[in-house]
Image (cartoon, coloured by chain):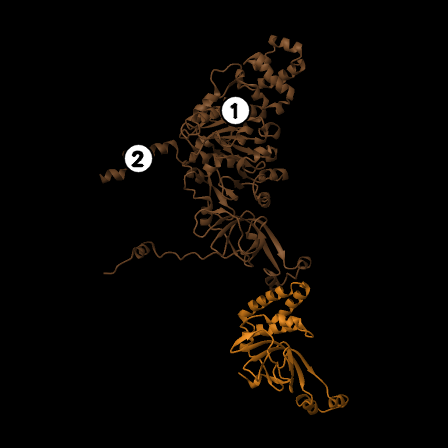
Chain colours: A brown, B orange
């Protein structure tokens, strides 16, 4: 009797094994450069230069089995002799063209080596040396990308997109690391910041690495959003119908109109407002330093209801008479403060008295692991309202986190869940003039000491305080045009200069450069498309199923199908 | 290896850099500019390879006198075929071979006077032009029309190959020329154009 090997048996069943794939052709060879300025690669004449784009990954296979993972940072056309560029040959002759291509004229890449993988190692390390002359350079394979970024199936990893020119290869972002430091999404208007942010938030919620508080300025995260083509996409609440998301609103009427189901309406009492809350608005309200100083003085004299009393035109403010007489406070200053605080009357969410404490409510949800989206409704158009509320809530939540973390004395038990606070128009909060004394500046600077990190979304990173910017660990950057903005996102990133070209050449949509703490090396990705049935399916949402279908399916599960019955 | 049909002539004078030979009759294709030739050295079993870079015919006093005369056709033929002064063929030494191994360098010794010089066969030309290192010897030679000589020799080498391989051969030769002559792009382009003629 013939012994059949298990391998043969499998082959008989599945058919012969496909031949091993051919090793890829090298793109070219290393001809010069260095660790700091990047390597120069002379392209092989068979390599089509038009097929190479900045931001693409390549691998230099060194002589000792080491693999140097690098990113293409520039593509150049070179000539052996500069005279050839001045007086080009007769290109109508295909023979001359073929002779010149790759010899007299050739393509050259600048690549920036970033990680190195030793022959038998499984973890790449930062690069500290360069490969020798004439080492071959290959396009990076799918396995190599997975080796660098980790498998998306691993816990805490989320598929965010595909590397350039590598369709079907998934880049997974390490979300555990993403929330360890503050993170930012930058890009000029219309580059897809909101979609990218919503996708990242969906990842954070799905992988349950942190609890989120989103200050949803334009009502795009909670229930539903819109593409630029006015197509509706599901918001976080629809993506996670299992109670992971709570939606709070400042403007119940607007939420109702949009069909957004809200858990609570946020109302803030005048008596809950402290001078620090108004201080954060000082630049928007054009409050001078003297006026800001006077706020604290007024609160001390007038008590907790100081704002209500200042706004009440019938209140004689008798406590202030002595101070006005002594000149401790100037009448003009008082009048200016009263006029400027008058803006609060337009905000209906501010009430003289409120029964419930909105911060307590939000904290309750966060403590239960529910992510909170605060919709601003019509107040989203008012930067003053956005900044006031975001500061008001964040300051108190941060205080609470500080107390709890200190009470836990550094032990993991009893520590609050890591919290990520998402703010839009971040440069208004983190402006160099105010970042020193607003809560967001504090959170960004103290890292995750108290388990709170920021997730900032902004189109003008140059407006953010450089000190805060340098603390932003992971930067997800869509296209930026402005030179100062580009400089700002690269501040504090080593090797940033070589990536400038990559950033300036991103597509206007669905492309982003990710760099910093959460990725082992910078990567340009074509981001996943949000809102497609595949995306919903990947997050476990069955878009097609109507309630009736779900009912039907569940019934059949309970009762068993007709075939089962027949079998019995 | 010697083939009487491919005899070009006998060595008149020689140096390691090149030699002159004399032949009595002009045959079709022999001798021709840019052709590969071979002399078998007498003192060793080495073959010396060269490229014909000049073919010249000098007059003699009798021909001078004949110019003015009205001569019959047989006298003209007689003076062409049975010459008093031989046709002089100049050869640039570009390689040496021993036991089938060819190297593109100057020979250790030149051929000696009255050695036979043979035109290389198609197979020899192909074997010799497997590598193209002889370009440098040609380009560095003095008093030789180097560009014309290279172009002519490459056309000969291409013709020695099957039709399907000629283009690829000329392109690889062109690329070698680019490496050597990148300093003078105009001259390079002219030379490349001449490979096609």
Which image quadrant is residue A441 in? Answer: top right
Q: Which residue is mark 1?
A: A395
Q: Label 2, label 1: how many angstroms apart (C-alpha)?
A: 49 Å
Placement of A1 over or under A435, stated as above or below: below
Callout 1: 10 Å neighbours few (<14), some, many (20+)? Answer: many
Residue, x 63% and y 59% (percent of image)?
A80
Please identify the quadrant where the N terminus of chain A is shown: bottom left
Which of the pair A243/A147 is nearer the observer?
A: A147
Tell whether A136 sits left or right of B92.
left
Q: Is residue A5 above or below residue B46?
A: above
Nearest to the observer: residue A407 or residue A182: A407
Spot occupied by residue A40 in the image (x, y as percentages of width and height)? 58, 53
Identity of the residue drawn at 31% across and 32% down:
A555
Q: Secondary structure at mark 2?
A: helix
Is label 1 in a helix, a strand or a loop? helix
Question: The disc numbered 1 marks a residue on which chain?
Answer: A
Dividing the picture into quadrants, the one containing residue A278 is top right
Can you tell which mark lies on residue B154? none
Q: Nearer the viewer, residue A360 or B62?
A: A360
The residue that disc 2 covers is A557
Going from the N terminus, do you reach mark 2 or mark 1 first?
1
Where A57 sits versus B161, above or below?
above
């Amino acid at each position: 009797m013939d012994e059949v090997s298990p391998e043969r048996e499998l082959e008989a069943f599945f058919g012969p094994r496909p031949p091993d794939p051919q090793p890829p052709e090298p793109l070219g060879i290393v001809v010069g450069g260095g660790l700091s300025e990047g390597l120069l690669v002379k392209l092989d004449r068979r390599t089509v230069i038009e097929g190479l784009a900045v931001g693409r990954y390549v691998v230099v296979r060194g002589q000792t089995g080491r693999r140097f993972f690098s990113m293409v940072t520039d593509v150049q056309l070179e000539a052996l002799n500069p005279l050839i560029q001045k007086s080009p040959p007769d290109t109508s002759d295909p023979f001359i063209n073929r002779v010149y291509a790759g010899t007299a004229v050739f393509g050259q890449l600048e690549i920036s080596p970033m990680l190195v993988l030793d022959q038998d190692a499984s973890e790449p390390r930062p690069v500290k040396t360069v490969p020798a002359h004439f080492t071959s350079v290959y396009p990076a394979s799918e396995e190599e990308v997975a080796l660098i970024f980790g498998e998306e199936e691993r816990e805490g990893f989320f598929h965010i997109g595909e590397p350039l020119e590598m369709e079907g290869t998934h880049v997974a972002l390490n979300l555990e690391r993403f929330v360890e430091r503050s993170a930012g999404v930058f890009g000029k208007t219309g580059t897809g910041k909101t979609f990218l942010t919503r996708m990242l938030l969906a990842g954070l919620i799905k992988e349950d690495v942190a609890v989120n508080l989103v200050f949803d300025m334009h009502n795009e995260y909670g229930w539903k959003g819109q593409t630029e083509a006015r197509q509706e996409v599901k918001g976080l609440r629809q993506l996670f119908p299992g109670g992971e998301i709570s939606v709070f609103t400042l403007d119940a009427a607007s939420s109702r109109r949009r069909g957004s189901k809200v858990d609570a309406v946020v109302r803030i009492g005048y008596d809950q407002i402290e001078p620090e809350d108004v201080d954060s608005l000082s630049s928007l309200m054009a409050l001078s330093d003297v006026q800001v100083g006077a706020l604290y003085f007024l609160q001390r004299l007038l008590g907790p209801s100081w704002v209500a009393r200042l706004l009440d035109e019938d209140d004689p403010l008798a406590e202030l008479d002595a101070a006005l007489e002594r000149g401790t406070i100037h009448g003009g200053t008082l009048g200016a403060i009263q006029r400027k605080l008058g803006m609060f009357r337009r905000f209906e969410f501010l009430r003289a008295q409120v029964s419930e404490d909105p911060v307590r409510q939000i904290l309750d949800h966060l403590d239960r692991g529910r992510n909170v989206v605060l919709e601003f409704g019509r107040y989203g158009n008012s930067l003053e309202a956005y900044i006031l509320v975001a500061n008001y809530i964040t300051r108190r939540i941060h205080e609470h986190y500080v107390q709890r973390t200190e009470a836990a004395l550094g032990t993991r038990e009893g520590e609050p869940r890591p919290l990520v606070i998402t703010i839009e128009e971040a440069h208004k909060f983190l402006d160099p003039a105010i970042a020193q004394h607003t809560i967001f500046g504090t959170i960004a600077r103290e890292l995750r000491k108290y388990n709170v990190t920021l997730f900032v979304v902004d189109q003008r990173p140059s407006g953010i305080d450089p000190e805060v910017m340098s603390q932003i660990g992971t930067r997800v950057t869509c296209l930026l045009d402005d030179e100062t903005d580009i400089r700002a996102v690269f501040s504090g990133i080593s090797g940033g200069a070589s990536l400038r070209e990559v950033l300036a050449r991103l597509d206007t949509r669905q492309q982003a450069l990710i760099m910093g703490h959460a990725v082992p090396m910078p990567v340009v990705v074509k981001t996943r498309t949000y809102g497609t049935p595949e995306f919903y399916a990947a997050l476990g949402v069955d878009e097609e199923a109507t309630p009736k279908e779900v009912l039907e399916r569940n019934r059949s599960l309970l009762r068993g199908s007709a075939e089962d019955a027949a079998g019995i | 290896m010697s083939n009487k049909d491919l005899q070009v002539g006998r060595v008149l004078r020689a140096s390691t850099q090149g030699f002159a030979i004399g032949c009595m009759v002009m045959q079709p294709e022999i001798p021709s500019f840019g052709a590969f030739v071979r002399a078998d050295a007498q003192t060793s079993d080495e073959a010396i390879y060269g490229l014909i870079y000049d073919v010249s015919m000098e007059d003699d006093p009798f021909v001078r006198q004949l110019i003015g005369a009205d001569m019959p056709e047989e006298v003209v033929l007689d003076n062409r075929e049975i010459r008093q002064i031989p046709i002089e063929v100049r050869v640039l030494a570009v390689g040496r071979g021993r036991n089938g191994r060819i190297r593109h360098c100057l020979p250790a010794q030149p051929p000696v006077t009255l050695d036979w010089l043979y035109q290389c066969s198609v197979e020899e030309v192909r074997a010799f032009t497997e590598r193209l290192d002889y370009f440098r010897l040609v380009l560095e030679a003095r008093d030789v029309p180097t560009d014309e000589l290279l172009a002519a020799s490459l056309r000969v080498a291409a013709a020695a190959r099957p039709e399907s391989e000629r283009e690829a051969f000329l392109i690889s030769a062109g690329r070698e020329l680019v490496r050597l002559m990148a300093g003078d792009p105009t001259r390079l382009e002219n030379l490349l154009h001449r490979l096609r003629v």
